[in-house]
Structure formats: structure tokens, C-alpha cells
Amino acid sequence: MDKELLRIVIIATGLIIIMGMLTWSYLKNKKLQQDMDFYDDHEFNKSLEINDDEDAETGIETLEATDHHYDDPEDAIYESEDDEVEPPPRAAAPNIIQFSLIAKAEEGFNGADLVNAFGIVGLEYGSLKIFEKLDANRLVDFGVACMVEPGTFPDRNLDSFYCPGLVFFMQPGALDDAQAVFDDYIETIQLLAIELDGVILDHHREPLTDATIQSLRQSL
């Protein structure tokens, strides 16, 4: 064989071998990459499944932890009762309860009209020259004075006497049944307000309200 031809054959054979090695290497690397991709995808999906399971379990546990479950229905009642706001403490009874009745007319209440109205509600003229409400034992439940000093009412010439307003006062601590007397006290003032055409004011010189009446009554 000609040396030149032999040289060409050897070179061609070498090239074929090199090309085969390159092809085999390429295919091997491709197969390896596919295997790695498959493995990565498989592990990733498996990780997702595990995380989803953990999240689901965590969510269930969270719901169970936050949900109020009572083995005994009374437990819920006791918890509700513990959350209730305690009522405010009872107010202390005042030493003196003092209300006023102010005349709507500019001239005030006339003396003769006062005596007539006082008789209707059972008030009596006393030794202190004021009108008083007496109990069955002739003891004073409450009194009524004139708003103008010295607070007394005359025993004569009543037609010429005028009083701009009346002051009512009672001492709960000196009474056996303060609430019953207080009810009579309020009723007397309200009847006189109608009979004499006056406006009732509380101890703060404000119009008397039902709330104030109930608050004072509950303190007795």
C-alpha cells in the first residue's frame, strides 16, 4: 500500500474514533443530565407534598387551638360570667336630702295658697314655724321651709306673704324606714309642684330627674 494512502487511512480511522468518542461522551452526558433533572424534579415534588402535608396538619392544629371547645357546657357559662363587668358600688346615703320647689309666677307662692296646699298633702305647722310631715308617733319625717331667710312662715297675715320658693329636707339616718319616707317625700313635692305651679330642683339646683330619684333611693 502506498505510504500516502496508508497515512490517509490512519488519519481517517483516527477521526472516526475521535468522532465516536465525542458522540459517546455527548450521549453519556445527556443521559446523566436527564437523570439528574428527573431526580431533582422528583425530589422537588416530594418536598412540596411534604410541606403541603405539614401545612395542612399545622392548619388543623391551629384551628383546634383557637377553637373554644368545652367538655362541659357549664364551662362556657362560667367563662362568660367571669367576663361580666361588676356593677358599680352602691352610693353612700347622704346625711340630708334637700330639694327645692321654685314658683313659676314672679311674685312667688302666696301664703294662703301655701297653707291650703300643705293641708292637702298632710303637712303641719310646727313649733319651729316651718311645716313638717309627722309619722304615727308624731315624729318628724321631713320638713319644708321658706327659701328666704330665716326660712320660717308667718302664722298670721298669710294673704300678704309671698315666698319665691320652698326648701324640702329629710335626714335618712334618723329614720327607721328611709325608703318609705323618701317615697312619701318625693310624692309630696310632686303634688305640691302641681298644686302650686312650681319647678322641682335637685340638690345641684338642676331639674329633678327620675335617674336622680332612683339613685338616691337605692342609696338608702
Image: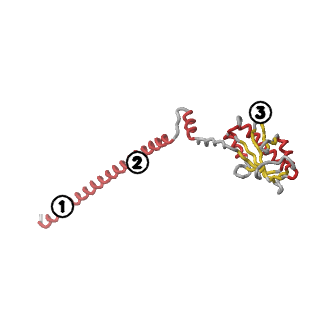
At horizontal 74% and vertical 38% (from top left) the residue drawn is 181
**Residue 78 coordinates in the image, percent (x, y):** 56, 35
The kind of residue on which mark 3 rests is Asn
Tag 2 residue:
48
Q: Residues within 10 Å of mark 1 (few under 14, many from 20)?
A: few
- Residue under pointer 1: 14
Q: Earlier in the sequence, mark 3 or mark 1?
A: 1
Q: What residue is rendered at 70% in x and 51% in y?
A: 204
Q: Closer to the camera, 2 or 111? A: 111
Closer to us: 86 or 150: 150
Disc 3 packing (10 Å; few <14; some 14–19; many ≥20): few
Residue 2 appears left or right of 111? left
- In depth, the one of 108 and 190 nearer the eye is 108
- As measured in the structure, the alpha-carbon distance from the residue carrying label 3 to the one carrying label 1 is 144 Å
- Residue 25 falls left or right of residue 160: left
Q: Quadrant of the C terminus?
A: top right
- Colour pattern of the rendering: secondary structure
Q: Which residue is mark 3?
A: 137
User: How far apart are the two marked residues, 1 and 2, measured between alpha carbons?
Assistant: 51 Å
Q: Which label sits in the foreground, 3 or 1?
A: 3
Which three-letter amino acid code belongs to the residue tagged 1? Gly
Q: Secondary structure at mark 3?
A: loop
Whether tag 1 and tag 2 are in contact, CB under 8 A, the answer is: no
Callout 1: SS? helix
Q: Nearer the viewer, residue 45 or 83?
A: 83
Find the distance from the CA under tag 3 to the CA under tag 2: 94 Å
Front tag of 1 and 2 = 2
In the displayed structure, 9 sits above or below 188; it is below
Q: Quadrant of residue 92?
A: top right
Question: What amino acid type is highlighted by mark number 2?
Answer: Leu
- Quadrant containing the N terminus is bottom left
Instruction: Give the left or right position of residue 200, taking residue 2 as reference.
Output: right
